[in-house]
Amino acid sequence: MNSFGQRFRFTTFGESHGKAIGCIVDGVPAGLDIDEEFIQSELDRRKPGGEYATKRKEDDKVEILSGVFEGKSTGTPIAMIIFNKNQKSKDYSNIKDLFRPGHADFTYFYKYGIRDYRGGGRSSARETASRVAAGAIAKLLLRELSIEVMSGVSAIDGISAESFDYEYAKKSEIYCLDKNIDDICKQRVIDARESHDSVGGVVSVKIKNSPIGLGEPIYYKMDSVLADAMMSINGTKAVEIGGGVQSSNLRGSQNNDEISKDGFLSNNSGGILGGITNGDDIELKVYFKPTPSIFKPLKTIDIDGNEKILELKGRHDPCIAIRGSIVAEAMASVVMADMLLLNLGRDIKTVKLAYSK
């Protein structure tokens, strides 16, 4: 499927080396201020280029085609498009019949019977620019309710942050959350690139000022939808909510978040109980694998099953977690917007209030 969400829903389209990528966002309430400069600034945070990302040069200039009039949402679908400007499809001509280890080439070919070898086609992380555009619209909605979604890189190549400073992450070239490991992590990325390899990383996301009661108790739980959103991002291999894996090593007396009149005394739950937000900060971690596009010879097979050696060319991120943090932030924003709109019909009082004269 190419769509995500129920009430606040977006659909993406396009391929890495196609003419354009884009998205259609449906369910945006009419009258929302649509700040186009803000949307572009979000895309600028994710766009390629720089010392720690792919050398592919894309402006990622977004154009709004519909759903906005005189700076306000009209309540109809908002269509946005980003034209690709710097494809180098010839970089992939030597591997057009080879499967790239770690990539979706193999599974896409056997699922669809079509081989789009140009940078991965639809499976490329290029698609995530569309998600960031949709997430920017979601953020404009969240801004009306003073809900803030933040992200940053909390680990690269096994070097982990000891403290999380989301304001510092905004200034860091690699969105690092801990200034004490920023330079070390940068060097790990550079070393990986210079040795024609790649490194993995961890992204932490925090959502502040979430109201109590978001999320459905069984099949559309807040934590399960957040996990779904994060696992849909290219390169994600695991997601933790709150205490995550560590919770399995604790006793109930250690893991339970005790409550005082001023609120919860800890946040092992990650702000979610029974699939429903409890009003505390929502906290999660997203684990990204090393970029599969590396420039070392690798054993593989071609589409006819013959054993080959892959020698890749092109321009690739040495650490996808860096730009992945912006995508994770966007997806968390979309989930929050969706849950807010779904929650409007939670009880008869809310329904009557919406339709009262």
Image: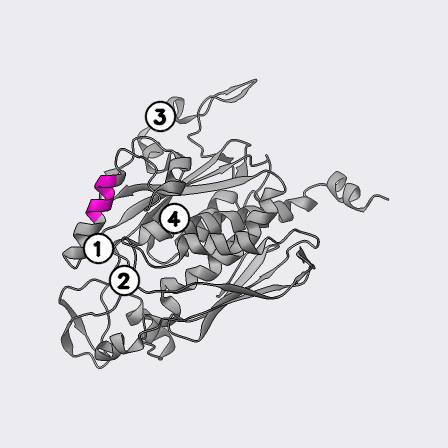
> In the image, 14: left or right of 314?
right
Amino acid type, label 4: Ser
Out of 347 and 132, give the one closest to the viewer. Answer: 132
User: Which mark lies nearer to you, 2 or 1?
Assistant: 2
Residue 251, labelled with which disc?
3
Q: SS for tag 3? A: loop
Q: Residues within 10 Å of mark 2 (few under 14, many from 20)?
A: many
Instruction: Give neighbour class at mark 3: few <14, some 14-19, many 20+ (Cα, 10 Å).
Output: few
Answer whether residue 112 is magenta in the image.
no
Q: Which residue is mark 1?
A: 198
**Could you give the CA–CA distance between mark 2 and mark 1, rounded to whole angstroms?**
9 Å
How far apart are labels 2 and 4 at the CA level? 17 Å
Helix, strand or loop at mark 4: helix
* Pointers 1 and 3 in contact (C-beta within 8 Å): no
Residue 193, above or below 212: below
* Disc 2: which residue: 316
Give the mark nearer the N terminus: 3 vs 4: 3
Give the structural element (helix, strand or loop) at label 2.
loop
Q: Quadrant of the C terminus?
A: top right
Q: Which residue is mark 4?
A: 325
State the CA–CA distance, disc 2 to disc 3: 44 Å
